[in-house]
Amino acid sequence: MDMFIPHTDSQISICIEHADLVVTMDAQRREIGDGAVVTRGAAIVWVGATCDLPTTLRDSATQIINAGGRIVLPGFVNTHHHFYQTLTRVIPAAQDAVLFDWLKTLYPIWAELTPDDVFVSTQLALTELLLSGCTTSSDHHYLWPNGSRLDDQFAAAETVGVRFHGARGSMSLGESKGGLPPDRTTEDEETILRDSRRVVETFHDPARFAMRRVALAPCSPFSVTPDLMRESAALARSFGAEMNIHLHTHLAETIDEEAFCLERFGYRPGDYAEHLGWTGDDVWHAHCVHLNQREVEHFAHTHTGVAHCPTSNMRLASGIAPVRALRDAGAPVGLGVDGSASNDGSHLLNEVRQCLLLQRVMGNPRAMTAREALEIATLGGAAVLGRDDIGALAPGMAADMVAFRLDTLWHAGGAVHDPVAALVFCQPQPVDWAMVNGRVLVVDGAPVHIDVALLVERHNLAARRLVERAGYI
């Protein structure tokens, strides 16, 4: 593809033409051979076959891009992550642990995070996500030691250019109160609520095509009190429907969590969420591996969202989420790579593949198709985050799209027979090209304004210093 400089001018128009295939994810789920997409500023203005492209649109374009040899899709949406965990990938003592033991190993290291650590890990995670096809990502950051703040993440996200939903996480139930995390990693609840209000008022943008949004996200049933869950929900909803503040937490991830909820609160995790008012179209939960059918149906009835994280669930031996049942019931389901210490990667296209394979592993080869997995990664993620402006290529939608090469060693053969399925079934690759909000961020497989080698060097130095401060050497 032709190289050009990213822009911010709302009147700049870009014409992408002659794509081997444009996968729209529009209402008709059109897949357009020799396809074209025209953008103006942050929005898509036209989608169709190149032969039908209006001459006036092409002639008025600021830039014309030949997308031959590529498949073009809506940018993927990541609905659950912990960016800071890129600093603690494959820590030896946590490599073969279940969730609770994994957390107890890593909490003391995470307690040493600094604002600079939060900034560089956010940059690295978002760059890695972008190169895997992700153009919108949430992040659930729930411990804030040594003066770190959500502000550090928003500042880092600005340098990468990906749409960012910052989930202001929190932990208040330390070991001394019967919770799992060490007391020094928790905050008092008054501080949490006060800062939650501050970040909403400072950063949240409810407008169409917004690049920055905020969610309120107490960490989990075993690290916060019922009062904080209720108060966080009340605070989010006090801003009104026009602000569209969403709620997020971990739920029903493991059998251990189920036992904790039953013993401490007298409810199964799904019932506990309902009891606290944590269901509805303004709520999404990560994992939901151990929901029963009644809870699945309640999530569907209330339009409560689920972030499915297949690789993490396998990595921590947590189980297989009932994605087929959730989808069949009508619950919104998106994909999440989860934290980079329980996935050890932030490759969202790989998560699409894992989503397909994990639903099939129980014996039904039709439990998930390639196109359904891609729909979960695009429209599904948009629905979970409460957005109707991303996830599809159609006039009036955000100019967020990615392109993958089809003429590679790894797609050979597959791209001939079914290029859409090849993208999912074959070896996941990085994007060749990516656009977010009408700005081109990746060309020929490389970010146009991020020095990846320098970023990796800075990140790895921060990772070494982090474990040294924690005494883990």
Image (spheres, grey):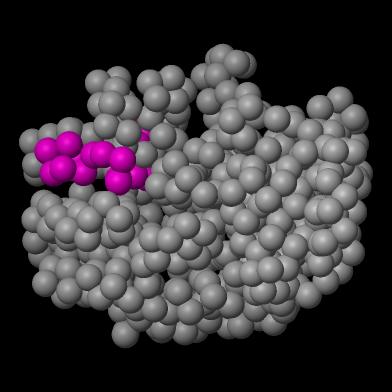
Side of 367 where 393 appears, left or right = right
Q: Work out which quarter of the rendered image holds the N terminus and state it.
A: bottom right
Kindly indicate the quadrant of the structure image that contains residue 82.
Answer: bottom left
User: Picture coordinates of residue 89 (x, y %)?
Assistant: 53, 63
**463 or 140, which lies in front?**
140
Residue at 22% x, 60% y: name it. Answer: 239
Residue at 43% x, 79% y: name it. Answer: 152
Residues in magenta?
272-290
Count of numbered labels shown in the rendering: 0
Kindly indicate the quadrant of the structure image that contains residue 52.
Answer: top right
User: Picture coordinates of residue 51 (x, y %)?
Assistant: 90, 38
Residue at 41% x, 83% y: name it. Answer: 115
Relative to 159, residue 64 above or below = above
Q: Is residue 365 visible?
A: yes
Side of 428 where 27 appears, left or right = left
Side of 7 where 234 appears, left or right = left
Side of 380 where 325 appears, left or right = left
Relative to 350, residue 453 above or below = below
User: Picture coordinates of residue 204 (x, y %)?
Assistant: 36, 67
User: Picture coordinates of residue 270 (x, y %)?
Assistant: 23, 34
Q: Is residue 65 visible?
A: no
Residue at 31% x, 40% y: name it. Answer: 281
